Amino acid sequence: MQSYKTKGTCSSRIDFDIEDGKVTHVKFIGGCSGNTQGVARLVEGMSKEEAITRLEGIRCGAKSTSCPDQLAKALKQAQ
């Protein structure tokens, strides 16, 4: 399990795994429960690269980032 401390969002951390290049076991700590659960389920089994492409750059209101964007950042840093 990998953990990423988020910056600039309501969620404080994202836990996830990458197995055979696929994103698995995504769990946001904090944030808007319905939205973060939805994002987590949508990326389940998606390739790391595809998830990054789809999520990177999404903004939340006037913020320069969002929970999906933070997940993209986490995946970019992942081993």
Image: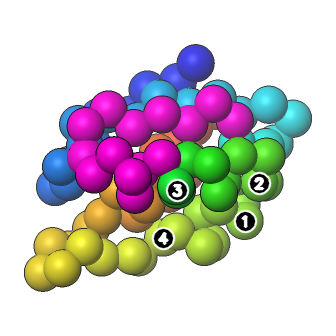
Q: Residue 72 vs residue 70: left or right?
A: right
**Residues at discs 2 and 1 in contact (Cβ within 8 Å):** yes
Q: How far apart are marks 4 and 2 (CA)?
A: 14 Å
Q: Which of marks 4 and 1 is nearer the N terminus?
A: 1
Q: Earlier in the sequence, mark 1 or mark 3?
A: 3
For disc 3, the marked residue is: 39
Q: Residue 50 carries which label?
A: 1
Q: Residue 22 vs residue 33: left or right?
A: right
Q: Does the magenta stretch include residue 35?
A: yes
- Quarter of the picture holding the N terminus: top right
Measured along the vertical axis of the image, is residue 59 above or below residue 78?
Answer: below
For disc 4, the marked residue is: 56
Measured along the vertical axis of the image, is residue 49 above or below residue 59?
Answer: above
Q: How far apart are marks 1 and 3 (CA)?
A: 13 Å
Report the magenta residues as a range. Answer: 24-37
- Quarter of the picture holding the C terminus: top right
The residue that appears at 62% across and 49% down in the rendered structure is 41
Give x and y (percent) for residue 7: 20, 48
The residue that appears at 16% across and 55% down in the rendered structure is 8
Q: How crowded is mark 1: few (under 14 residues within 10 Å), some or many (20 or more)?
A: few
